Amino acid sequence: MGRFRGSITKLSRREGINLAETEKVQKYLDRRPYAPGQHGQRRGRGRPSDYSVRLREKQKLSRLYGMSEKQFRNLFEEAANVPGVTGTVFLQLLERRLDNVVFRMGFASTRRQARQFVGHGHVLVNGKRVDIPSYRVKIGDEISVSEKSRQMGFIQENMEAQKRRRTSPWIELNPDTFSGTFSRLPAREDLALPINENFIIEYYSR
């Protein structure tokens, strides 16, 4: 199954969280805090099964990062084979995706936009163009916008907006040079994600 390309607002309502992490989607969720569709307000009245709870948690996280099921599962299996707390390692691997780092740095307003941004060749890693959204960023890597792309209106708007927001503590950002450094792996407490990763571990371990 391919990546979902429909309304991120509808998906957010279905999952009950702001998948785009934007103020616009949050306002919409506040107005309509129930699933989309004719029977949206009637859903969820019964007690969901254990399987359903774990599936929904997995869906939330994969849709938050905009990944296909195959990509998501492969990354989870890699995390499960790395020493450490599997849930935290998994989230760190997700955070190291280049499209996510571009989003965290504020070069793009959403992960969807960041994926397109990377794919079109606007991003440099340590001075070299990288157009693979799933590219894994390493500690100390410098991520920047190419010189030509800095003149694009939406990128300048994104950076102006980022100056008014708090930058993720594991990222060192210099908005004036359209660049930043992935300085360390985020700790679990750094990630304010409305996700219980233990349910995802249980889902894939069933």
Image (tube, rainbow, N blue to C red):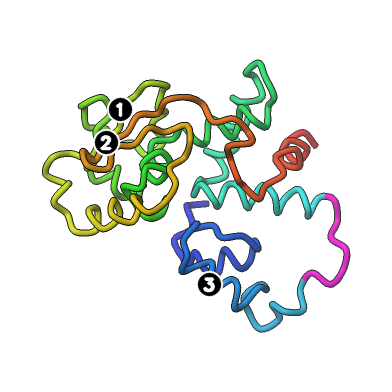
Among all residues in the image, which is located at the extreme top? 83
Q: Which residue is mark 1?
A: 142
Label 1: element kind: strand
Label 2: element kind: strand
Residues tagged 1 and 3 counted as in contact (Cβ below 8 A): no
Name the residue: 24% across, 46% down. 120
Q: Which mark, residue 27?
A: 3
Q: Earlier in the sequence, mark 1 or mark 3?
A: 3
Q: CA distance from mark 2 to mark 3?
A: 30 Å
Instruction: Find residue 52 and report its horizontal and vertical position in percent.
Output: 78, 55
Name the residue: 48% across, 52% down. 2
Instruction: Find residue 92 and report its horizontal and vertical position in percent.
Output: 55, 31
Residues tagged 1 and 2 counted as in contact (Cβ below 8 A): yes
Residue 199 lies left or right of residue 74; in this view the side is right
> Where on the picture, by quarter, is residue 105?
top left
Is residue 183 or residue 143 the one in the foreground?
Answer: 183
Is residue 26 or residue 65 the one in the foreground?
Answer: 26
Is residue 110 or residue 134 the one in the foreground?
Answer: 110
Residue 126 lies left or right of residue 60; in this view the side is left
